[in-house]
Amino acid sequence: MSEQIQRIPVEITVNGTCYKREVEPRMLLVEFIREEINLTGTHIGCDTSYCGACTVILDGNAVKSCTLFAVQADGGEILTVEGLEKEGELHPLQQAFSTEHGLQCGYCTPGMLMSSLVLLAEKPEPEDKDIRKCLSGNLCRCTGYQNIINAVQTAAKDLREA
Amino acid sequence: MYPAPFCYHRPGSLKEAVGLLSELGEAAKPLAGGQSLIPILKLRMDEPSDLVDISRLPGLHFMQNDDGNVRIGALSTHALIGRSDLVGAVPILGDCANGIADPQVRARGTIGGSVSSADPSCDWPTLLHTLDAVIVCHGKAGVRTVPIREFIRDSYTTVLDDAELVTEIRFKVPPANSGGAYIGFKKSAPAYPTAAVGIQLTLADGDVCQQVRLALGAAGPRPVTSDEAENLLRGKVLTSELLKQAAEAIVEASDPPADARGSSDFKRAVLRSLFMQAADRAIERAAGTQIMGNHEYV
């Protein structure tokens, strides 16, 4: 390791906007999102790849942004919770989490939303067990999960009927 | 949490990657999906001087089944393997691939990384023992193939030298009347298994066990096998009494460490129970029943 800190140029598209930055190789993607481009909806929970609060969508896959270096996402397209709302209207998933009381403290919610969005893109008519499996990497310490599952089912229905 | 500082390299070819690793020496580490490595770096259990990002190297993302000869590129993710056609031909692959951690980890983690890390809790090394897989390695001196039984030397230790990379996993599709099952017991999805059992067997006339491979995971520094337990079953009709004896024999050969996931005795009890469940599922599959399998967690 040389004395000088290495900086790597990256181009990462987040919610449709391309951000060019020079980052230290050890910068985690979640820090890039929160501190370089100031989108703080993506949360750091356990910081050890367990809880899923930091989940974002990278090139179509839900990933834990605390377990990815920003340099690994170079050239990639990311969707965070801030990208869900369109023209002041909540995304059907966000609306359903609200109406079904799928959150209490809300800390895990951005991750829950991003994981669920990938599921609904693949399976517009999920069974409850699909939702449980999809959210197995997203921990919630408030709700007991049942209302989250109801919310995803409600959103799935709303999206099918939209 | 930040890892210690390191230099980052993104070589464009396998040759360049091997050259870089060779030049940088043992303080450098390859980075693929990072799902084992990055948590280790963040906890500063390792502080490599350099990371060589091999995740975009061309030619290592593939899965093939040519007349029963399976080849899986080292950069294939758990998610892609779990959704592939290979799972129909070799169901035990699906048990493993779809049970590893959670969807987010499966989308990034690779089979080559899992095998190379030789983490005693990683699922692929144990699973690949049941299929007598061969690991293809590329290094400065060229290509060599190493049977999985010789590949993993100890916990976190393989036969790979500093500038050698796993590029491919090979095994044969088991013959007709074969069945296998892999079950890991986990406290929650994202957690590593407390214990895991893989069984792959082939039945002949009258339900006689013709061939069998047994392996235990997270049950010692490296995957646990037992010739004694396999010999007990080979050539016999598989009664539950006989299976219990085989379970006893292989669990006797295990050395599960006491840790936050449980005491050694608890883990041995889990291994015995998983062994009987996996055996039942493997026998049902060998008889042609299609059953979904997965890791068990509470």
Image (spheres, grey):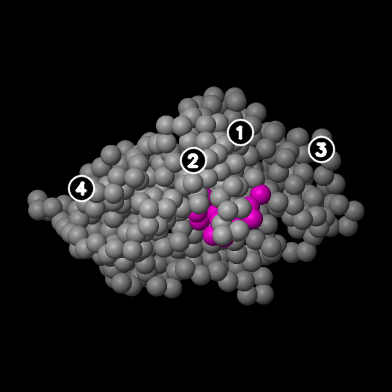
Name the residue tied to disc 4: B5
Is label 1 in a helix, a strand or a loop? loop
x and y, in percent, of residue B259 in the image: 48, 27
Decide if residue B156 is in sight here.
no
**Span of residues in magenta:** A115-127
* Residues at marks 4 and 1 on the same chain: yes
Q: Residue at x 70, y 51 (%)?
A: B292
x and y, in percent, of residue B186 in the image: 57, 37
Outermost residue, right direction? B206
Q: Residues within 10 Å of mark 3 (few under 14, many from 20)?
A: few
Q: Amino acid at mark 4?
A: Pro
C-alpha gap between disc 4 and disc 3: 55 Å
- Label disc, if present, on residue B124 of the rendered structure: none
Name the residue tied to disc 2: A98
- Tell which subunit mark 1 falls on: B
Name the residue tied to disc 1: B298
Q: Residue at x 63, y 64 (%)?
A: B86
x and y, in percent, of residue A84 in the image: 41, 54
C-alpha gap between disc 2 and disc 3: 52 Å
Q: Nearer the viewer, mark 3 or mark 1?
A: 1
C-alpha gap between disc 2 and disc 1: 28 Å
User: Which one is nearer the viewer's eye here, A3 or A55?
Assistant: A55
The first of marks 4 and 1 along the sequence is: 4
x and y, in percent, of residue B199 in the image: 68, 48
